Amino acid sequence: MSQTPIGKYMYLVCFFDLPVHTKKDRRRYTIFRRKLMQAGFVMMQYSVYITQIRGTHQVQDRIKKVKSFAPKNGEIRLLTVTDRQFDRMEMIINYEYMKSDESLSYGCQTIMEF
């Protein structure tokens, strides 16, 4: 009996932009988001969800699952990132919006690497 090779941890990132103009659109958005969470994804930020998986065989299974409940309208993008790539992510937190008459600027207070 052969075993499926298990690789290192990877992350599957789901970016989505779905219409929410009508009540029917908002319902589709809510259903998609709920099913995404049931499939093991957690919110990283608005419209960006992430799940940790082990091995490439699980990546393909998870992609098939998301495709199965994806709504017809809007855009959904899935990106596979290795554990090492994810660790190199830089995160800027605790920013403030400072709106002037001409432009929008961001004042960064803290930069964290993880």
Image (cartoon, helix red, strand yellow):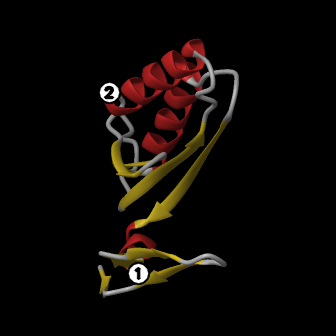
Measure the alpha-carbon separation of dots 2 and 1.
Answer: 28 Å
| Residue beneath disc 1 | 88
**In front here: 108 or 18?**
108
Looking at the image, which is closer to me, 81 or 102?
102
Q: Residue at x 55, y 14 (%)?
A: 23
Above or below 37: residue 3:
below
Viewer-proximal residue, 107 or 84?
107
Locate residue 65 relative to residue 17 in the image: left or right: left
Q: Which residue is mark 2?
A: 38
Give percent across and percent down for residue 85. Answer: 45, 74
| Quarter of the picture holding the N terminus | top left
Residue 34's tag is: none
Among the 4 quarters of the image, the one containing residue 37: top left
Image point 32% across, 75% down: which residue? 93
| Above or below 42: residue 79 | below
Question: Dot 2, crowdedness within 10 Å: few (<14), some or many (≥20)?
Answer: few
**As shown in the figure, which amino acid type bears the numbered disc 1?**
Arg
Looking at the rendered structure, the secondary structure element under dot 2 is: helix
